[in-house]
């Protein structure tokens, strides 16, 4: 099995430009309108924003509840993807996702979720601040560890 890649999100770098949402929405829908996007920016009143998308859970509740077998896991990359031809539009997967990262697209009458654009995420390519990166899972953990360690170092120097 090849190394699995993950969508790494760094909220501190996000500038709220919505490029990720627009790039994603244009993929299947051919329109630059964020509502059908598989990645969404969550804005906070106090300031700041965080891009969120499917976490590609190992024990994916959406996959478990899909009676039509419209969701399947790519064994090479571990990504759970939706097959629009099989989707019944029942929205069971939408209800099952504990993070709200699957939605229903009325225009296509189907569930939509991030599938990493089959290995080349458009959101990553469109992100000017590198708040989104597509990295091997081991690299994602190393990056988070470095950010944490830098914060500890900065705090220690401030003492």
Image (tube, rainbow, N blue to C red):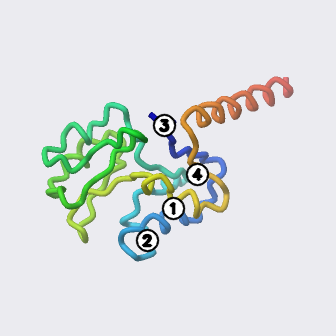
Tag 3 or tag 2, which sits nearer the N-term? 3
Pointers 2 and 3 in contact (CB under 8 A)? no
Q: Is residue 122 above or below residue 159?
A: below
Q: In this view, does 29 lie above or below 74?
A: below
Q: Name the residue under label 4.
A: 132
Q: Which of marks 2 and 3 is in front?
A: 3
Pointers 1 and 4 in contact (CB under 8 A)? no
154 relative position to 76: left or right: right
The quadrant of the image that shows the N terminus is top left
126 relative position to 97: left or right: right
Tag 4 or tag 1, which sits nearer the N-term? 1
Q: Which mark is residue 2?
A: 3
Tag 3 or tag 4, which sits nearer the N-term? 3
Pointers 4 and 3 in contact (CB under 8 A)? no
- Helix, strand or loop status at disc 2: helix
- Helix, strand or loop status at disc 1: helix
Pointers 1 and 3 in contact (CB under 8 A)? no
Residue in the image at 40% along x and 57% along y = 38
Q: Name the residue under label 1.
A: 122
Pointers 1 and 2 in contact (CB under 8 A)? yes
Q: Which of marks 4 and 3 is in front?
A: 3
Q: Mark 2 points at which residue?
A: 26
Residue 34 at x, y percent in the picture: 43, 68
């Amino acid at each position: 099995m090849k190394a699995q890649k993950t969508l790494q999100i760094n909220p501190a770098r996000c500038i709220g430009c919505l490029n990720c949402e627009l790039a994603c929405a244009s993929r299947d829908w051919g329109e630059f309108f964020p509502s059908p996007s598989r990645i969404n920016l969550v804005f906070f009143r106090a300031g700041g924003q965080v891009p969120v998308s499917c976490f590609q859970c190992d024990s994916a509740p959406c996959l478990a509840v899909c009676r039509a077998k419209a969701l399947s896991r790519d064994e090479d990359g571990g990504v759970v993807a939706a097959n629009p031809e099989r989707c019944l539009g029942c929205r069971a997967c939408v209800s099952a996702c504990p993070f709200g990262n699957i939605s229903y697209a009325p225009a296509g009458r189907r569930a939509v979720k991030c599938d990493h654009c089959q290995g080349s995420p458009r959101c990553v390519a469109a992100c000017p601040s590198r708040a989104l990166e597509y990295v091997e899972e081991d690299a994602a953990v190393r990056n988070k560890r470095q950010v944490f360690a830098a914060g500890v170092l900065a705090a220690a120097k401030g003492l």
